[in-house]
Image: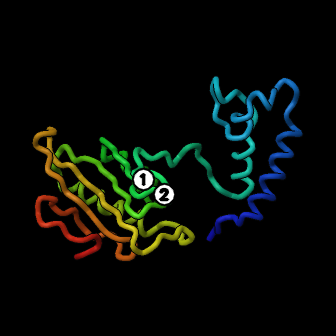
Amino acid sequence: MLQPPTAKEFLQTFLETYNKSLGEANQTDKVWDNWTAFMTGRQGKSDGYYEKKPVLERTAEKLGLKHEREYLRLDLVFFPSGDPWGTFVALEHEHNAAGFVEEIVKLMSVLAPLKVGITYDFREDPQPQSKLVQLIQKDFSTRHPSILEVPQTEYLFLLGVGTAPETLRWKYLAFTCAQGPSNEFLDADEEPRAAGAS
């Protein structure tokens, strides 16, 4: 199984790649004027333009890893003001449940004591609800073992079921990292169970 790189491995690979990329750049590339594009590959008026493969994309490839720019941009984070700092709640909202897979992976990839995902079932069909539970269970169980969370980390997935805002009923799936997800969404208007309770 592929292991994550150590800081030393990353540093060595990054420096080799950076120096090689810099050596391949020519005067017309204007690397400094296009620095973000040269380093990350993000192109645009404020980031610059660079036609060759960017430094960090090459670094990922040399480490045998895939990459994606700005992948973990969360919809919302809730945090206390002042010190100590930190994200208390990481939240993802997706209008279309079919696109929720990326949101689940984001939530399972970030650090926060509470992670909340919200999506909808506008057809009131139990089959997509069951598939959503299976997807959450699969993503939870197939994370790389190097991605560690404290056992008390809580997950809360909310599912709005209905055909209009005034008719939505809310269902939820709550669990802790130590216990893992259950097999079904529960009705939120019933007595809520503690995260992970069966």
Residue at image coords 17%, 51% = 125
**Residue 165 picture quarter:** top left
**Mark 2 is on which residue type?**
Gly
Percent coordinates x, y for residue 27 in the rendering? 88, 26
Percent coordinates x, y for residue 94 in the rendering? 34, 44
Between the residue at mark 1 and the residue at mark 2, the CA separation in whole angstroms equals 6 Å
Asked if the residue under mark 2 is in contact with the one under mark 1, i.e. CB atoms within 8 Å, the reply is yes
82 displayed left or right of 133: right
Percent coordinates x, y for residue 179 in the rendering? 35, 76
56 displayed left or right of 21: left
> Which sits in the foreground, 122 or 84?
84
Q: Can residue 129 be seen in this view?
A: yes
33 displayed left or right of 177: right
For mark 1, what is the residue?
A: 79
Percent coordinates x, y for residue 122 in the rendering? 19, 43
For mark 2, what is the residue?
A: 86
**Mark 1 is on which residue type?**
Phe
Residue at image coords 49%, 66% = 143
> Which sits in the foreground, 163 or 12?
12
Q: Is residue 105 visible?
A: no
